[in-house]
Structures are given as C-alpha cells and as structure tokens.
Amino acid sequence: MLKAWEIENFLSERDNQLFINGVSAVTLAEEYGTPLFVFSESRIKYNIERLKRAENYIDCALKVCYAAKANSNMAILRTVKDANCDLEVNSGGELWKALQVGFRGEQIIFNGTSKEIWEIEAAINAGIYAIQADSLYELSLIEAAARRLNKTANISLRLVPEIETNTHSGLQTALLTSKFGMMPDEALRAFQLYKDSEFLNLCGVHLHIGSQNPSAEPYSEALKTLFENLENIYLETGLKLSHLNLGGGFPVNYLRDRSQAEHFSPAEREMFSADFEPADAIKNAWQIVKEAARSSNAENLLENLTLLLEPGRSIISDAGICLTTVRNFKQRPLFSGKLEEDNQLSTINYQLSTDHWLLTDAGFNILLSMETYKWYYHLISAERTNDEHDFPYKLAGPLCDGGDVYFDIEGEGRLPDYRLLPENVQPGEVLALLNCGAYSIAQMFQYNGRFLPSIVLVREKGEVELIRRRDGFEDLINNDSW
C-alpha cells in the first residue's frame, strides 16, 4: 500500500529510503551535496498531459502555455518544450530565455504590468502569439513601438473581472484592489480606439483569477465573463476575437499526507488540500459558455476560437523536491503551561517537556514562499521513510534571520508549529521537502553569502542530469566592482 505522500511512477519508498523515479534521494544528496533540488522529467510531462485533457471537453482548440515565472531554469523550459507545451513569459529576460531554448514566437505569450520599451520591441520582433496589454497607456506604447518597427503586434487585453476565490490574499489577481489589468469598459474603449490600427492585431481578452484556487466554480464565472466581453466587443466594434485566455491557478494538493492537516485552520486546510481536475473545471465552464452563446444567438463567436491556459504551479510544483541535511541540533525547555495550552501538542499525543530543534541547510533564501506566504511543504526523512513520522520537532534554516523557520513565528496558525519526523533525528540525516518545484528556483537569492544550490533533473529512463551547478565563491561577486 502506498504511503500518502507517494506518487505512482514518481515518488516511492524502497529499502527505507526515498526514491525519485527509481533514483535514491540519499545517493543524490551524497553525490551533489545539499541543499539540492531534484526535478522529475516524467512528472512534468504527466502534469502537462493532464492539463491538455481539457481539449477533449471543448469545441475549440486549446493552447496550454506554461508560466515560466514558476521555474524558468533552461532545462525545465526545454522539458516543457519537448512536451509540446507553449509558454507564458513575464519579462524580456524570460522571453530571451524562451527563444534561446527554441520556442517559436507563435508559442509565446507575454504578460506583465510594467513592460519596458525594449521588452515590447523584442516581443514584436519575435512575432509572439500575444502581448497581454495591461492598460490603455501600455497599449499606446505597444502601438507606437509597432509603428516604429513597421510591424503588427498581436494583442490581448487583460481584464480585472472582480472575481474572488478562497486562496491566499497574496495570490488574488482578479480583484479591483489588485495591480493587474483594466476594467471591461476600458478594454472596450481600447478596442474602439485601435480596431482599425494597421499596427495592432487585437485578437483576444485575458484574465487570471489567482493561484491555488480550492474550488473549480470560479473558472466557470471567469470563462463566462470572458465570453460576455467577447460578445460585447463584437456588438460594439464588429471585431471577432480569435482567442480567450483563462489564465491558470489550478491547485496542487500540498496535503496529500494529512498527518498534520488538523494543525491548519479550516480555510488554510481547504487551500493546501485543494485537488480537482483542471479538465473537469474547463468542461463545466465551457458548457456554461455554450449555453450563454445559445441564449444570445452568438454561437458563431465560438467558431474558430482558441482557449488559452497559463498553468505554472500545477505543472512544476509536485515535480520538484528539495533535499536538505540536518546540520545542527539543540533542545530547549517548553514554557510553563505550554503543554496544556497548545492544542497542536495535545493532538500529537506525546509527553514532552523539551522543544527539539533541527537546523537544516535549506533556508528561505531558496524557499522564499515559506516566509512570504507561510507556504507549507510536506517534510519527510529521506533516509527513514518507513519509520513512523510521529515525533515533533521545531525546524529552521541556516540564515541569520529569525523568520528563517519552517513554522509561523507570529502564531497566526498558518503553519504547524512542529514538523513530524522519526524519533532521534541527528545531524547528517537527509530530509526531503516535497512539492516545492514552483516559485523556489525562480526566487532564490544569495542572502548571507550562501551558495545557491545544485539542481538535477531525473530523466524518464532514470538518468540524472545536472541542470544547475552549485555556486562557488566567485559566483558571490560576479557582478560586483571592487
């Protein structure tokens, strides 16, 4: 019987160790050192195919564009491209990386709220599928750039639809209070102003309702909103759009192993354990749009349409594991009355008068979301996977910062105060943080002069490829003048 954290054909237990696509995590840690990120080529491709299944339930073409911001390591981008997946970029730098890997212009869409002129020009010169215009002002910049280059820019307008979901406040992107997009009446005004421009091809509308959404229902509301705008634009301007972009945000189940689920508030538990099929969400949303089109005699607007998705987290998050080594151990007495007052301790059901601290070599400089969003990554011993994980520890990283801990120091209940591991963990033991492939590599930094880690990719046949070498001393000062 599989353990709750195991994933068939990907994560498994063998000889009391964690194996990743048939490769021992402990052996990888010994060979490449820790902290070490390990990614699975087969899992990335599986996640892409899972999203592509949505095309079976819609009456139009589907274009899945991996959100490069989630992880834009070059080998990861290559893996995405080899899986016949397109790409969403958020900067000129990501656009450059995409072109270097071999993505063609028509495979790329470009988001972002503050594009510079050189980025706009690069996107136009590359002939990308769509630049997502974030405001009327930005649209004027794009039109001017296209005019200078004497080329046509493909444009989709990003809307802010005021759709709220039960995700983390920092991941809400479809509210009036968010920084993204333009109001629907502004977008309509943009189509009216530029519909006859020979330098702009106004071909779509776009929205994004945020990330890690626990419910599929907002996707139906979002796609219906996009269709209503498409219909209104057609009625007011005569323009028939060629695509709708529903964004991404499909969730990952960070609580497959529910051993600490009761330590979260109901809202946090719902968010971290969200688990629905994206294809089912798209199927339901499409049926609602078809009904709306029929009721308004606008079914012709769905002909020759392409639906775009921008998944990031749902493709790369559970494909990445961070291996970290315990480097230090200490004990401290609990405060008087702590055992009686702390519900988390009482539910663990053990007798403890001491806090047991484990200090690892993986801090928030390589797992920033653990600090900024208090994000949860399930933790297991990579060396003793078959042992009972029932002993509570305080976990912390190596940084000279009081917030570099694996729990919420403000006591807001967002994360468990303790992590459950086998008893008697000692320095030198290798631990594994699961589901941390998204927004970790892309956001890591050299705080405290710490070397950024190696990254390996386990290929489909079990070969291990080094896709990022560990920093050395020279990397700490590469761009410094002294």
Image: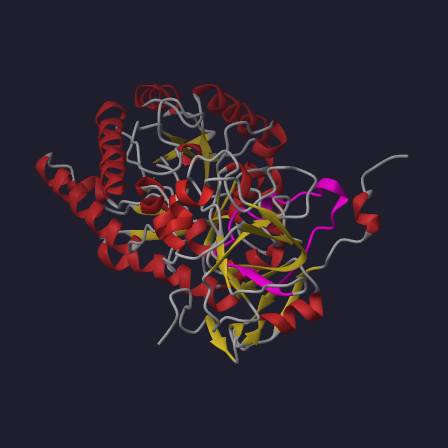
Outermost residue to the front? 336
**Magenta segment range?**
429-456
**Whether residue 139 is situated above or below residue 213 in the rendered picture:** above
Counting every numbered tag in the picture gives 0
Residue at image x 45%, y 56%? 351
Outermost residue to the right? 482
Query: 346 or 179, which lies in front?
Result: 346
The reply, left or right, for residue 471 in relation to residue 341 is: right
x and y, in percent, of residue 94 in the image: 59, 44
| Quadrant assignment, res 238 | top left
Residue at image x 22%, y 32%? 228
The reply, left or right, for residue 75 in relation to residue 232 is: right
Residue at image x 46%, y 53%? 86
x and y, in percent, of residue 418 in the image: 49, 50
The quarter of the image holding the C terminus is top right
x and y, in percent, of residue 118 in the image: 63, 31
Query: 397 or 347, which lies in front?
Result: 347
Task: Indicate whether residue 441 is drawn in magenta.
Answer: yes
